[in-house]
Image (cartoon, grey):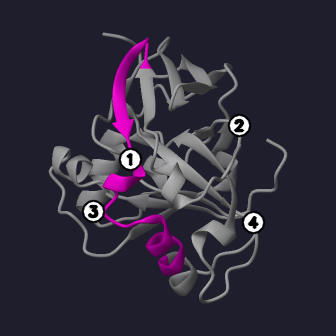
Amino acid sequence: MNKLIANVYCVGRNYRAHAEELGNEVPTEPMIFLKPSHAVTTMDGRGLELPADRGSVHYEAELVLRIARDYKPGITVDELVDVIAFGIDFTLRDVQNIVKDKGNPWTPAKGFLQSAPITPYLAFPGAAETANEDFVLRKNGEVVQRGNISRMIFPLQQIVDYIAEHYGLGEGDLIFTGTPEGVGPVVQGDKLELSYGSQVLGSCTVASGPAAK
């Protein structure tokens, strides 16, 4: 990973079926939260050290955009993004439920170290062409998530416009664009593999984390 990372924006509940599987309301405008840049790491087959003592850890596979230039009104997402990756938004689900109930920020559940592993970058073919293939997450060889950006509630152009208008958007920013249905827990020893179309792009193993029951 040789490109500077600035802000790491994430879109919550951007697939209707995912919002519904967790019993959440479907949003009427993009739900944006942030991860620290220190959360980002590379899915290069290495083991990931995840929290082992803070309850369940869930995987959430997502398309990740890298912003190549500063946003200006009217710019298209195809002009704004140079490369994409696929990543996992690891989430401490028990912690998230607690902070949600208290009305507190999600950072304790979403912002821990190595909570945002991403595959090596691919050239961005444009929003329309990106929708021609599904992205798939396998856990221990079994497909657990399958997503396609055509099923997003908020398309890529709306996401970049919204983030830029409300928070700013510039070179080096990453955007995790939301996860489809099928999220679930990982335990120590699980292997996760992300692919796009027929191409395997990256993998990681949970080197430490919740113990298998």
Q: Which residues are magenta?
A: 139-162
Q: Is residue 136 left or right of residue 102?
A: right
Q: CA distance from mark 3 to mark 1?
A: 24 Å
At label 3, the amino acid type is Lys
At label 2, the amino acid type is Pro
Q: Earlier in the sequence, mark 4 or mark 3?
A: 4
Element marked by disc 4: loop
Nearest to the eye among marks 4 and 3: give it: 4
The percent coordinates of residue 105 (x first, y second) are: 41, 64
At 41% from the left and 66% from the top, the residue drawn is 155
Q: Earlier in the sequence, mark 1 or mark 2?
A: 2
Where does the N terminus fall, quadrant-wise? top right
According to the picture, the residue beneath numbered tag 2 turns out to be 120
Confirm whether the magenta stretch covers residue 109. no
Q: Nearer the viewer, residue 43 or 98?
A: 43
At 56% from the left and 41% from the top, the residue drawn is 86
According to the picture, the residue beneath numbered tag 1 turns out to be 179
Nearest to the eye among marks 3 and 1: give it: 1
Task: Identify the mark at residue 68; answer none if there is no mark.
Answer: 4
Q: Earlier in the sequence, mark 2 or mark 3?
A: 3
The percent coordinates of residue 177 (x first, y second) are: 47, 56
- The answer to whether the residues at label 2 and label 3 have Cβ atoms under 8 Å apart is no
Q: CA distance from mark 4 to mark 3?
A: 37 Å
Element marked by disc 2: loop
According to the picture, the residue beneath numbered tag 3 turns out to be 102
Q: CA distance from mark 2 to mark 3?
A: 37 Å
Nearest to the eye among marks 1 and 4: give it: 4
Element marked by disc 3: helix
The percent coordinates of residue 88 (x first, y second) are: 51, 39
Badge 1 density bin: few <14, some 14–19, many ≥20, Cα 10 Å = many
Residue 144 visible within the image: yes
